[in-house]
Amino acid sequence: MRVLFTTASALALLAAPAFAQTPPPGVGTSGATTSGSSASSSTTSPSLGATTGSMTGRTGNATTGGHGTPGAASRSASDQSNQPSSSDKNFVKKAASSGIAEVQMGKLAAQKSTNPAVQEFGRWMQTDHTMANALLMQAAQSANVPAPTTPTQEDLTKMKDLQTMSGARFDAQYIRGQVSDHKTDINLFKREAADGRDTRIKSFAKASLPMLQAHLQEAQALESSLSNGQTATSAAAGSPAIGNTALGAGKPVPGAAPGH
């Protein structure tokens, strides 16, 4: 079995550094940071780093006509432009609830399904969405945006229904829901990646899209197999559904032990 955790690891590397580069609201404009505010990050996203660097350069060179604190007006404008918008807050609310539901439904699939491919897909959802949820919470906390810690009532109802099912009926219902949910999530994340104001939340959305698209591709392959009455397999050349589609179907995970 190939190693899971591939897309989650990639997401962590891509997204985590971006969250620390813009201080949360309330941090002073003198350049000082609160204790531990950026200790966990040693690198920055190239594109965002360039943007931040150019903003810093403009701030440092700004003048106020010889009066006042140099750069104060630029810093104030920069801070204001990065304040989370209502759209950012709505994204956090929906993405957090959805991600928590994905973990819980994935756990249910791993425990309840008798189909090895569906079980493996469920474990993949647990792994990736647990990591993604942690990164989203980090971004939301940095931006002072509240995030829910439970699924929506709609998702709780879906899980309750799944708990009453078994066998092929459970598998079909779970995978069908995964296809629908991931399509919805991808649209949500695309909007935030394109139009979000807060760079921490926007960066998380952008970095998460490859993961979500890999999940959708795998769910659709499983749905097709199940609907045709075939043994459920991933798109990875007939191997069981596994968490490696983000790296390319059928390609081995670098550094991983050969499948067995």
Image: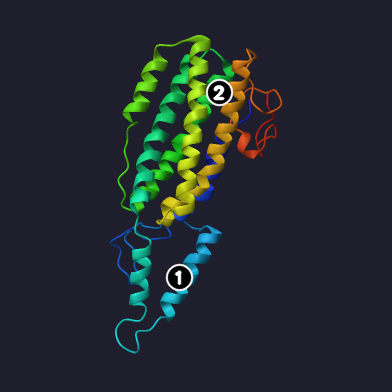
Quadrant placement of the C terminus: top right
Q: Nearer the viewer, residue 216 or 44?
A: 216
The number of numbered badges drawn on the structure is: 2
In the drawing, does residue 130 fall left or right of residue 249?
left
Q: Give me the C-alpha separation between circle 2 and circle 1.
A: 45 Å
Residue 164 versus residue 77 in the image, above or below: above
Can you identify the residue that label 1 sits on?
55
Q: Residue at x 38, y 84 (%)?
A: 63
Element type at mark 1: helix
The picture quadrant where one finds residue 36 is bottom left
Residue 69 versus residue 126 in the image, above or below: below
Tell me the amino acid under the disc marked 1: Met
Residue 226 versus residue 192 in the image, above or below: above
Q: Are marks 2 and 1 in contact (CB under 8 Å)?
A: no
In the drawing, does residue 192 fall left or right of residue 217?
left
Tell me the amino acid under the disc marked 2: Glu
Q: Residue at x 42, y 17 (%)?
A: 162
Q: Nearer the viewer, mark 2 or mark 1?
A: 1
Q: Position of residue 12 (x, y in %)?
A: 50, 45
In the drawing, does residue 165 fall left or right of residue 33?
right
First reached walking from the N terminus: tag 2 or tag 1: 1
Q: Position of residue 255 (x, y in %)?
A: 66, 39
Is residue 84 visible from the viewing direction of this image?
yes
Disc 1 crowd, CA 10 A, few/some/many (<14, 14-19, 20+): some
Q: Position of residue 10 (x, y in %)?
A: 56, 44
Is residue 16 visible from the viewing direction of this image?
no
Element type at mark 2: helix
The picture quadrant where one finds residue 258 is top right
Q: Which mark is residue 197?
A: none
